Amino acid sequence: MPEQRRGTRQRTRWFAIAAAVAAAIVAVAVVFTVVRLRSGGEGPPERSLSELDADIAAGRVGDARIDDATRTATVTGTDGGTYTVAYPADYGPALTDKLLAAHVPVSAAARSGDSNAVADVAIRVVPSLLILGLLAWLLLRRGGLLGQYVNIRNGRGASEDVPDVTFDDVAGNVEVVDELREVVWAIREPQRFTRLGAHVPRGILLTGPPGTGKTLLARAVAGEAGVPFLSIAGSDFVEMFAGVGASRMRRLFDRARSEDGAVVFIDEIDAIGKSRITGHSNGASEERENTLNQLLVELDGFSRSESVFVLAATNRADVLDAALTRPGRFDRTIAVGVPDAAGRREVLELHAREYAVAEGIDWAALAKRTPGMTGADLANVMNQASLIAVRHEHDEVLSSDIVEAIAVVTIGPERRSRVPSDRDRRIAAVHEAGHTVCALCQPEAPDPVQVSIVPRGEAGGVTWTAGTDDDFVTLRQAQAQLVLALGGRAAEELVLDGDVSHGAMGDLRTATDLARRMVTEFGMTGFGLAYLDERDVHVGGAGADVHDAVRAELDAALGRARELVSTHRELLDAVTDALLEHETLDPDDLAALHHPPVG
Ligand code: ADP
Ligand code: MG
Ligand code: ZN
């Protein structure tokens, strides 16, 4: 399909050249004819070459003027009469010789004031113009010498290839892909829209966190439509010389227009599309404004027939200038979110195709362990898993390699080289055992999938629980999460006789974040049903009240955690000892330690 389009485009181009050349030839011919008619109208009579020969031989020629440009000789006879003679091409010099040999004074035609001057100018100028025009056309057309020059200067900027990426390379974004299919359709067959008078979609803004596949989707749109992908990043425009940003933007769109359909992708559009109201004016912001204005001009300048489609991506849709999202510009916004468990499973399986992966892997279970991960994170997981498999000298990538890779990507690699002191190991074991007990003994809390006191990343130990993808967080689940988060601290208090380590810092942050959302967003607490945003909390004076409500929630959770670890002290000690002995426990180990009370 792309090849066919290419071919058509090539043929169209050659037609254009042929037409231009033909037009030039016709123009020259017309000029000649006009000149001929004009000079033939009331000029001297015309005679033939043989008559001239006879006159020369008879000595009846007084003088002659040779005009090689029009191949005419103007002859004045000795009797004073004047006539003209047309002679064949290249005969001029021979005729001149013949006349001179007969002692006839010969002059060359005067150039100016002559009626032939127009023809002269035409003859001299038209070919040069043709050549100049051809050169300019060669230089300026896209992909020409100038185009290549621009490419080199732009570095990672515009590229005009049709990407070999399709929607098959995108996993877990079903709704987004469905919306973008319409765009592909509009690029391929715009007449289906225009015939009904429908508005052809022109620009779509993709919003979402980094790594969710926005660039991938944009490339896939171009790949599916079989048109070139021209991309540029907003950050490319930062710190540019005055005027460069705007002209670069113009050039990008000019090139897109010269294509038979194209996708223009503006990454990090917030870098140029920040709201113009905020901030004071300086050189840099002026340049950004110029660039933004040029973008707006380009977006407004599309005619109905052009099939240039503009996609832009940002993770800061909130700061964009309202002018960008006006109808006819980026009139649609598609949120590209972090995938859910099913989506993550698809992404994992898609990327697994790039590696030699063992049969029968439980992808759904692995996907459950990766809540919050983006497509890019999951691609990274599979890559890390393959490296881990190599390190372990496995023949294929095993499930355990992927589990390890998930841990590496989320928290960091195990740091086995850092040998903790016995005291630190014991604190870590007690702390993680506290989390584990709170996970195992609360029905609403997720189950632990791995507990470890091997230092990993910044953490001294990890209690890993199965993530949840439930759409709704219930009050009981949220409270159980708080208890789970504070379980480490509660166990330290109990076992270390009231002394505590700073190891709970991360836990406190997690718990406080969740508690604050329960208070200010979920309306789950005694604070009431109000939804408060940051402004309300800081400026509106609700800050102190929110703080009190968060504290109350955390205190209640810590109380419940203390209760759990002391009533399940035996389990707590068993897990602590097992950790000190084995360092890492999996769900089977934990099940063996945990004998849930009947009922
Ligand atoms: P963004 O532009 O949103 O930051 P990218 O498109 O650059 O994200 O994604 C980076 C990489 O992550 C992609 O090249 C791809 O390998 C992987 N990826 C992200 N999202 C997906 C997805 N939905 N399906 C498959 N791979 C994905
Ligand atoms: Mg990107
Ligand atoms: Zn902890």
Image (cartoon, helix red, strand yellow):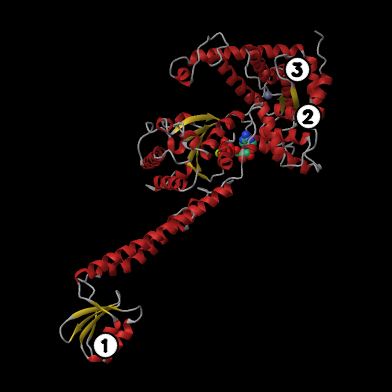
* Mark 1 or mark 2: whose residue is earlier in sequence: 1
On the image, the x and y values in percent for residue 580 come to: 79, 27
On the image, the x and y values in percent for residue 496 come to: 72, 20
Q: Nearer the viewer, residue 577 or 401?
A: 401
Query: What mark, if any, has residue 54 been given in the picture?
Result: 1
Q: Residue at x 49, y 19 (%)?
A: 533
* Numbered disc total: 3
Q: Quadrant of residue 572?
A: top right
* Mark 3 or mark 1: whose residue is earlier in sequence: 1
On the image, the x and y values in percent for residue 48 come to: 28, 80
Distance, label 1 to label 2, CA atoms, is 121 Å
* Mark 3 or mark 2: whose residue is earlier in sequence: 3
Residue located farthest toward the left when viewing the structure as drawn? 80
The N terminus: image quadrant: top right
Q: Is residue 149 above or below residue 415?
A: below
Distance, label 3 to label 1, CA atoms, is 127 Å
Residue occupied by mark 3 = 440
Q: Does residue 191 appear to the left or right of 119 in the view shown? A: right
Residue occupied by mark 2 = 584
Q: Residues within 10 Å of mark 1 (few under 14, many from 20)?
A: few
Q: Would residue 577 be visible to someone looking at this image?
A: no
**Mark 2: which secondary structure?**
strand
Front of the two marks 3 and 2: 3
Mark 1 CB lies closer than 8 A to ligand 2: no
